Amino acid sequence: MRRRSLGSVFACLSFAYSLAGAALAQQPETSKFGAWETQCSPSTNNVKLCALVQKAMSEEQPNVGLMVAVRKAAGMPNGVIQVFAPLGTFLLEGVGVKVDEAEFPKLPFFRCTQITCAAEGAISNNLMSKMLNGKNLLITIYANPGEGLRHILALDGFKDGYNALPQ
């Protein structure tokens, strides 16, 4: 699997979030909520695009990081969850999602750029309930078939951050 330094992975992942339509020339507004941070950037029509984000490193390979973004979206009552994984991730396995002991369907990858691969899915009522009240979000990406790399994200501050996201 191709490796990147921590700094370049996070720089790439931050850029990937900007693919959602944020103006590249401007610095995003940020606010901290426990382990989470909101990042908001104006789009070309001056509408704020915001996501609640957290970065994590793999337990098995500490040099492999990812970023999780949760954002509210029109037509999706609980919004969407996005995972930005490094290049070299085995895409066919998708992304495993687990909150505390509850396992959820895998997220499919939908796009890779020159710097990252993105998986996305709608947040179900059950997943949202668990995330709002849980302790840890476990995201698993795959280096090879069946070879998962676990990333643990604390859900401390998630509820307040999610509630602060604009519609």
Image (tube, grey):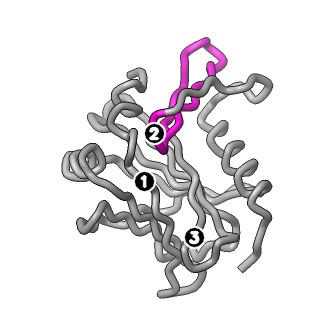
Q: Earlier in the sequence, mark 1 or mark 3?
A: 3
Identify the secondary structure beneath mark 2. Answer: loop
Q: Which residue is mark 1?
A: 154
Q: Residue 58 has which mark?
A: 3
Residue at the limit of the structure toward the top, as seen here:
46
Residue drawn at 49 percent across, 72 percent down: 150
Which image quarter holds the C terminus? top left
Identify the secondary structure beneath mark 3. Answer: loop
Q: Give the percent coordinates (x, y) of residue 142.
A: 54, 77
The amino acid type found where label 2 is placed reads Gly
- Please report contact status of discs 1 and 2: CB closer than 8 Å, yes or no: yes
Q: Which residue is mark 2?
A: 34
Q: Is residue 1 left or right of residue 8?
A: left
Residue drawn at 78 percent across, 66 percent down: 4
In the image, which residues are magenta?
33-52
Q: How much space separates mark 1 and mark 2, taking CA atoms? A: 9 Å
Residue 152, magenta (yes or no): no
Rendered view: 87 above or below 67 = below
Q: Is residue 71 left or right of residue 27?
A: left
Q: Is residue 56 left or right of residue 156?
A: right
Q: For residue 88, what is the image quadrant?
A: bottom right
* Number of residues whose C-alpha sits closer than 10 Å to that of mark 1, classed few (under 14), some (14–19) or many (20 or more): some
